[in-house]
C-alpha cells in the first residue's frame, strides 16, 4: 500500500459563505455535489475532484483539533493566477526555489488558513 495523492482538505469555519466565495472567486474552484450530511458545509471541486471540504463551525466539533500549517495546490499558469489574486485584492507572498524548480505564492483564506500555490515550470 502507498499513498497515491492528496484526496481533500477539510476546513471548519464560522464564515461558511465568505469561505465558499473565496474558494470559488479567488481560487477558481467550483461548488459541487456533497452528500446530504446533517450539518452545514460545501465541497469545492477542481474538475471532477473534490479538493476542499468546508464544514460550518457550529457543527464542526466532530473533527479533530489540530494545527494546520498550510496546504498546497499545483497551478499551471503562474502569471494568470497572480493576476487573479491582484484582481481580488488578495495579499500574497512570493518565493522562488534557489534551483528554479518551482515558484510559489502564499496567501490566506478568510479563516487565516495558509494556502500555497506552486508552479513548476519544467512540468
Image (tube, helix red, strand yellow):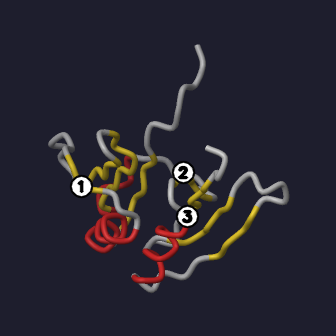
What percent of the width, then of the height, locates residue 115?
55, 62
What percent of the width, then of the height, locates residue 117?
56, 60
Mark closest to the chain's N terminus, 1 or 3: 1
What percent of the width, then of the height, locates residue 103?
67, 61
Left or right of residue 89: residue 105: right
For the point 56% across and 71% down, the residue is 107
Name the quadrant containing residue 7: top left
122 and 5: which is toward the camera: 122
Q: Quadrant of the C terminus?
A: top right
Q: SS at mark 2?
A: strand
Q: Nearer the viewer, mark 1 or mark 3?
A: 3
Find the residue positioned furthest to the right: 98
- C-alpha separation, residue under disc 1 versus residue under disc 3: 23 Å
- From the image, tell me which residue sits under label 1: 31
Q: Nearer the viewer, mark 3 or mark 2?
A: 3
For the point 59% across and 61% down, the residue is 116
> Which numbered dot is residue 78?
3
25 and 33: which is toward the camera: 25
- C-alpha separation, residue under disc 3 versus residue under disc 2: 10 Å
98 and 10: which is toward the camera: 98
- From the image, tell me which residue sits under label 2: 74
Name the quadrant containing residue 33: top left
CB within 8 Å, label 3 to label 2? no
Q: How many marks?
A: 3
Mark closest to the chain's N terminus, 1 or 2: 1
- C-alpha separation, residue under disc 1 versus residue under disc 2: 19 Å
Q: Quadrant of the N terminus?
A: top right
Q: SS at mark 3?
A: helix
What percent of the width, then of the height, locates residue 72?
56, 53
Amino acid at each position: 500500500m502507498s499513498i497515491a495523492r492528496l484526496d481533500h482538505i477539510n476546513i471548519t469555519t464560522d464564515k461558511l459563505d465568505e469561505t465558499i466565495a473565496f474558494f470559488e472567486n479567488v481560487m477558481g474552484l467550483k461548488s459541487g455535489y456533497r452528500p446530504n450530511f446533517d450539518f452545514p458545509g460545501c465541497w469545492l471541486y477542481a474538475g471532477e475532484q473534490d479538493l476542499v471540504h468546508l464544514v460550518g463551525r457550529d457543527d464542526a466539533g466532530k473533527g479533530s483539533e489540530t494545527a494546520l500549517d498550510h496546504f498546497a495546490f499545483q497551478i499551471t499558469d503562474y502569471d494568470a493566477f497572480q493576476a487573479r489574486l491582484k484582481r481580488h485584492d488578495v495579499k500574497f507572498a512570493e518565493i522562488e526555489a534557489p534551483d528554479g524548480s518551482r515558484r510559489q505564492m502564499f496567501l490566506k483564506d478568510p479563516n487565516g488558513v495558509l494556502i500555497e500555490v506552486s508552479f513548476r515550470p519544467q512540468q
